[in-house]
Image (cartoon, rainbow, N blue to C red):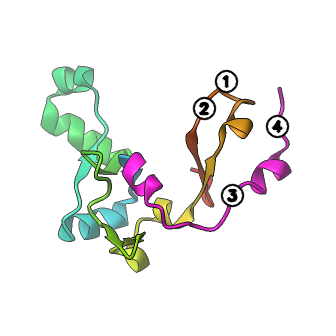
Amino acid sequence: MSVDEEVLKTIFHECRQCGTCCKEYRKISLRADEVAFIEKMGGHVGVNVSMAEICEKGLERASKEAKQKGKVYMIHPDEKGCIFLQHKNNKYYCGIYHYRPRVCRGFRCNLADDSFLNLFVGEGAMHLLGKDAFGL
């Protein structure tokens, strides 16, 4: 089945400030120049390494190589979401909005209902769809 890209573009709307994306996405890709700021502000930063890599190379070397390859992420360890997510007046706000990571800046979201998702994943689906302006 093929889906028309132009039709897909019409489903992405302006942010509703519901906070779902900041709660659901637990691993946000960071660029090298964003890591120090996120750490300084109290964000959780980690690297993507497998247990096999740790066993083979050791944690220090595996982590260093992952950083060199750009596999560095801001991590949200629980269902509360991003550490920078703030809630007031029944809306969610980013505490570092003007300095948020590039992936967050480009993210466009739509909470799709099951009528749309039935095309992809079957009946009764509810899912957060997202696409950022940078193709990530």
Instruction: For the N terminus, give its image quadrant.
Output: top right
Residue 131 position in % (x across, y down): 61, 52
Q: In this rendering, does residue 2 appear at all? A: yes
In the image, taking residue 63 as reference, residue 119 lies left or right, namely right
Badge 1 or badge 3: first in the primary sequence: 3
Numbered circle sitting on residue 122: 1
Q: Above or below — where is 52 with respect to 112?
A: above
Residue 78 position in % (x across, y down): 25, 45
The Cα–Cα distance between marks 3 and 2, rounded to whole angstroms, is: 18 Å
Please give the residue where the numbered disc 4 appears in the rendered image: 3
In the image, taking residue 130 as reference, residue 85 lies left or right, namely left
Question: Residue flagged by tag 1: what amino acid is it?
Answer: Gly
Please give the residue where the numbered disc 3 appears in the rendered image: 12
Question: Residue flagged by tag 3: what amino acid is it?
Answer: Phe
The Cα–Cα distance between marks 1 and 4, rounded to whole angstroms, is: 16 Å
Which of discs 1 and 3 lies nearer the camera? The answer is 1
Give the class, few, some or many, for how many residues have Cα within 10 Å of label 3's Cα (few <14, many ≥20): some
Give the class, few, some or many, for how many residues have Cα within 10 Å of label 4's Cα (few <14, many ≥20): few
Please tell me which residue is depicted at 18% across the width and 65% down the height of the picture.
42
Which of discs 1 and 4 lies nearer the camera? The answer is 1
The Cα–Cα distance between marks 1 and 2, rounded to whole angstroms, is: 6 Å
Asked whether the residues under the numbered discs 1 and 2 touch, taking CB atoms below 8 Å apart as contact, a structural biologist would say: yes
Badge 3 or badge 4: first in the primary sequence: 4
Q: Is residue 4 magenta?
A: yes
Numbered circle sitting on residue 125: 2
The Cα–Cα distance between marks 3 and 4, rounded to whole angstroms, is: 15 Å
Residue 46 position in % (x across, y down): 25, 47
The Cα–Cα distance between marks 1 and 3, rounded to whole angstroms, is: 21 Å
